[in-house]
Amino acid sequence: MADDIETSFHKAIDDGKINGAVICATDADGHFVYDKALGERILLSGEKIPQRLDDVLYLASATKLIATIAALQCVEDGLLTLTGDLSSVAPDIASKHVLTGFSDDGETPLLEPPARPITLEMLLTHSSGIAYDFMIPRLAKWNQKFNRREENSRRGVEKAFCYPLAFQPGTSWMYGPGLDWAGRIVERVTGRTLGEHMQQRICNPLHITDAQFNPVTREDLRARLVDLNPQDPNALGRAVAGGNGDQNKQSQGDFGGHGLFMPAADYIKILHSLLANDGKLLKPSTVDDMFQHHLNPEATAGQQSALAGPMGIFFRVGVDPETKMGHGLGGLLTLQGVDGWYGERTLTWGGGLSLAWFIDRENDLCGIGAVQPALPDFDAEVVATLKQIFRRDVYRKRAAWREQQQEQTS
């Protein structure tokens, strides 16, 4: 597959692997702008229309960055602290025990009390012990035995993620619903829904009007909703999740870990605000802190083990295994630069299997790439390759643009 966006994405469209894509990238001054809508999206009627920059996307885990910003705003407002005990606002988290296994007959869970309090910093960096149950077999077994969901029922954060911890707080790392809990804590301390807080404190300052948590009910957004088509008639975001829409189907309320819908043309405004450190969302010092490594030595060792493990290809979000990595507030953090690509302390993550974003302050570039996979035959290899082409090729396009600017001024 060619390594430039236009050629490779159009080939994937022609081959029926994807329907389209939306890509947005910019620098802090807004001088370099790369906005591209490719291919088509399919309406619920089956009609195909050209993909547009303002089409509404399911962000999946790209929601986590925005929930992180919301939580950090509460820290700035004095409602929370980053490293303090959360038990006064989240006793349901503080009471969680660590599941170490089951009795010999497999019936009785073996639990031990937490050795230290869970902090907001732990929730934001996946080091609290709160992990996705599908990542940890013993958590999945506990859920099957004690927290089985009734068919066609919806559950809020507290019920969906009521299961025990996977490890002692702060002693390891595993991807999980910490941002869903952080979102609920934001709701508790502000008295607003997470969506209301995000609209007032994140979207309004950036003139974003087209964001809504699942389920999307605004008719003006549904008319532009990519994930409302014959393969996804309930707009669950199935394509983004590789064909599975269970998370949104089962969710009740605003989930800070996965539930937001928004156009890429708006998401890039959030990335740009952090890149420019313009003070519209957070204080400059808070933004600076987002780009620091926030895991203690024990949790760092746990993250390195996870990055090298079977799921590491997903946790590295396109970064080579040889590159030093850590975790900032909002995503994976590169701890060294990569020649011609990410600079040191680039913050990056994604959404589902088809969306990627990054903020590279050293090289003054940020971007979001949202691939729209074709269903029912989701091609994970093609989608992963296209995401990586996006990540790399925007740097080449930026370099070519710079050369052109220099030629014009010389």
Image: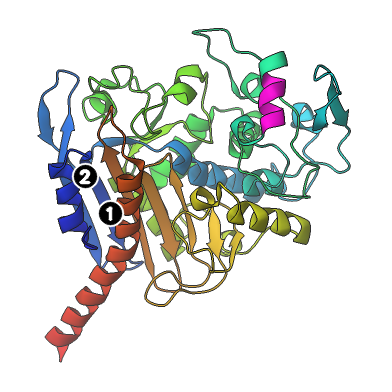
In the rendered image of this protein, does residue 189 appear above or below residue 319? above
In the rendered image of this protein, does residue 401 appear above or below residue 239? below
Say if the magenta span includes residue 141. yes
Mark 1 residue type: Cys
**Quadrant housing residue 8:** bottom left
Residue 153: give x, y in percent of width and height. Answer: 53, 9
Q: Residue at x 17, y 28 (%)?
A: 42
Residue 118: give x, y in percent of width and height. Answer: 77, 41
**Residue 308 visible to an observer of this rendering:** yes
Q: Nearer the viewer, residue 2 or 174?
A: 2
Q: Is residue 93 left or right of residue 34?
A: right
The quarter of the image holding the C terminus is: bottom left
Residue ID for mark 1: 24
Disc with the residue nearer the chain's start (1 vs 2): 1
**How many numbered dots are placed on residues in this image?**
2
Q: Nearer the viewer, residue 252 or 334?
A: 334
Residue ID for mark 2: 53
Question: Gap between marks 1 and 2, in whole Å?
Answer: 8 Å
State the mark number for residue 272.
Answer: none
The quarter of the image holding the N terminus is: bottom left
**Quadrant housing residue 380:** top left
